[in-house]
Image (spheres, coloured by chain):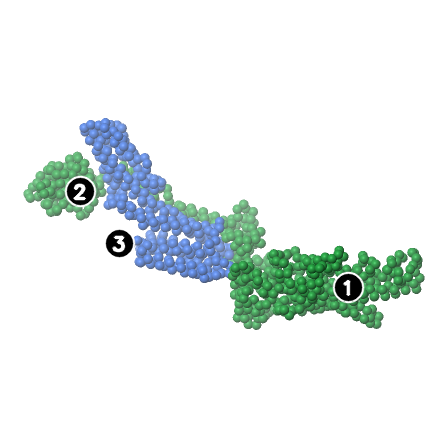
Amino acid sequence: MKILLITQTRNKKGQAARTEQPLVVDVLRIGRGTDCKLYLPDPRVALHHAQIRHGADGSNYIEAEAGSFSVDGSLNRPGKLLPDQRILLGPYELVILPLQQDYDLVLSVELLDPLREGVEEVRSNVQAGLQTTWLSKRLFSWTAAMLILAAFLVWPVMHATTDENRGAALKADVAPDASWDVGPLASAHASFGRDCHKCHQLPFIQVKNQACEDCHKTIGWHFPLKTAEARAIHAAVFPETRCASCHRDHKGQNGLVRTDATLCTDCHRDLKTRHAKTGIPDIGEFTRDHPPFMLSMLQPGRSGDAAIVRVPQDTKVRENSGLKFPHETHLSKKGVRSPAGTVTLECANCHVRDEAGIRFKPVTMKDHCQQCHSLEFEPKVTTRQVPHGNVADVQTTLNEFYAQAALADTPIDVVVEAGIRRPGERLAETKRQAALTWAADKADRIAHDLFEVRVCFLCHQITAVPAVDNRPATWQVAPVAITRHWLPKSRFPHSQHDTFECAKCHQVSASKSSADVAIPDLKKCRECHGGNQPTRDKARGTCETCHGFHTGSHKAGVPAIVPGSTRPRPQTSQGNAANPATQVSADAPSGGAAK
Amino acid sequence: MRHRTILEYKHYRYLKLAALVVIASIIGFAVHASPVGRYGGTPMGYALGTVGALLILWLMWFGIRKRRYRASSGNIQGWLSGHVYLGAALIVIATLHTGFQVGWNVHTLAYVLMLLVIFSGFYGLYAYLRVPHLMTENLGEDTLDGIILKIADIDREARRLAVGMPDNINLAIQDSLQRTRIGGGVFAQLSGPPRKCPTDRAASLIQASVREFKGEEARANKDLYGLMLRKQKLLERARIDVRYKAILDFWLYLHVPLSLALLAALTAHIIAVFFYW
């Protein structure tokens, strides 16, 4: 179709101007789209607003596309266009002019209603975009950041710098540095509460060992650092010696102590690569390559470190305690005779658990033996016994007793043999000497009877020492050394094994000799204990189950003898009167085992 | 050519990089067995923490970088793609750094703020990938300004027609002209078309009174009704457009302040940890 487009414009003075533009198109598209031949650049016009088509009947037809229009006041009424019709399309007016020349359509276009104030009214009611509201990224950001820095950085730092501030912080209702706390302290440290300075003594410096050692004064390193060589080895094997390398607090009640097997096996799997001269066998796993137990046996008659002999456990190991004690007799099912009649003994009659429930109190003559093995010496006087533990004391007691009896005004019937006297009779010197001679003789005979025939020899090895010159005959009691802690480098809490009979591990009912060693061996432990990895039907058996890392720690076991404490000593051939150690060695040779 | 999203940038270059970082972190975490457990205070913990903190700084640098139009280090799509993927990777890195230990402290505060920042970012990503389509569907080739102009035209016509109508209708039309709001406060913008709109009221009033008129008045009434219906449709599109724009913007009002809060908490966390080393 051939179109003549007449565009009407008006200048500022309102004078009209017109431009004519011939077009040849199939369809006249109208819109603000640039592909529209009738281009109406106004926002109120759609891109493709409407179109005019030349019909087969020679007429022109208008139809809407995306916009709306009115033809002579009728809205959106598509149809045939007639000359002089006015089409309002957005702010534009299109007028159909009479045909001229050979044009199919003559159309005038005029912008009637340029954009103007009416829009402002609408705009005044439009609020679009969140930036127009009270929201503010900047304000929120600064506020949040400043609050956080103030509460969680400035406030705590201010209260953690000087002693005065720290003191004030401790008294405050809310600890300023509570927000820094990464987790609950170990139970032993819980009492520190919010006094962070107790350990964290210098800002930006790692917790120093000194902070630990302020309290843990007795804790030792992995092995004693007594010699220069030991110190050199220690420095080589443990290049980093911060307590906190292993002990990290704030990990809950039990979080402070390492219990992983690698703590030990990292080195002990092949210890020779760390220290070529070591005598300690390699071990990686309890169930597989734990070496036989090393029994620490107390040797009678020795002192100091020499009092302990360490021997690998096997069937040939015999104990030399200096005592005679057949378990078989005492544990006989038929019972044993006692002042109270026949009684059947149990282990617990003599072996009494210590307060910690870990091991046993020493078996003593006074508490456990003497009830049956009475030290009475005079059949007619049941209230007197000789003291236990010292030969000289025994002899003195006997001498004094019989001398007293012989010289007393009211002689008792034991002295009948020394001659009958009337009450109140004063003894003549000759008679007094005779009485004393009798008493000394009697004491000697009774002592011989006690040591060699009736009492002492039952349990002890007794050697008679004949009288020499002016020294009277006496007896030598072999030193006694009862091992109290056979495996001092381990920790075995008996209380945790209460579910078992004693005999499960300690088979003594058939033992005829005190030389029998009744300490269970590795095989016995393995019946119940697995290794580092959990095993079905077995209790875990990590290194840490029995051993500790530090010397001086409660888990490192208890030394068989604590340096400086009383140790077993050999008795002199004189029965060493007034030597307190004798008593110890006889009754509680491992007094040193006390922690 | 199909439009490629920032997620697919350079054949998923940053997805691959992020996956690499995540896998390396997981392997490092699994392999490095510290005698004191797995947490932020072990060598591996320090390493993960350093990587995480540097990543946070780099991610936050995006907020500055995106406004530097003359910067030459890569284009902004690349930066955004990296921002998204490495931000997501940070979840894994930081979680491993914590060793899965949380508590009521500034350390966990930093961790939680970081998660909030990242998840608000995920929401922003979702909005950026989805809302522009919806906006185009809604407005088509129009713009909000164009719609406002059209409404202004309708208003003018309506005002002209309403002059000859009874008072109640004229008042309702005036109400529609003067009190019809588009957008508004935070809630109004986010919630879209309001329940009570003067234009709706005018339309229903005109519709209800259609039987009261005859002749010229009836025709004017009918035209007015048509105008109000057109205005309603335009209003709905305008308001939906405002809502979409608000949705596109709103998450940033969380993302940015939370990022700055995170930066503060992270600073406090790092200083606190080494203050009480």
Q: Report crowding for label 1: few under 14, some 14 to 19, many 20 or more residues within 10 A (C-alpha).
A: some
Q: Are marks 1 and 3 on the same chain?
A: no
- Dot 2 alpha-carbon crowd within 10 angstroms: few under 14, some 14 to 19, many 20 or more: many
Tell me, by letter, which chain the rendering colours blue.
Answer: B
**Which residue was labeled with disc 1?**
A455
Report the Cα–Cα distance between label 2 and label 3.
Answer: 31 Å
Contact? badges 2 and 3 (CB < 8 Å): no
The chain to which mark 3 is attached is B
Task: Decide if residue A396 is on the left or right side of residue B234.
Answer: right
- Point out residue A318 in the picture as x, y percentages from the top left corner: 66, 69
Residue type at mark 2?
Answer: Ala
Query: Does A562 sit left or right of A475 as displayed?
Result: left
- Residue under pointer 2: A50
- Residue at 27%, 41% (x, y): give it: B237
Name the residue carrying label 3.
B2
Apparent colour of chain A: green
Amino acid type, residue under disc 3 in the picture: Arg
Q: Nearer the viewer, residue A340 or A427?
A: A340
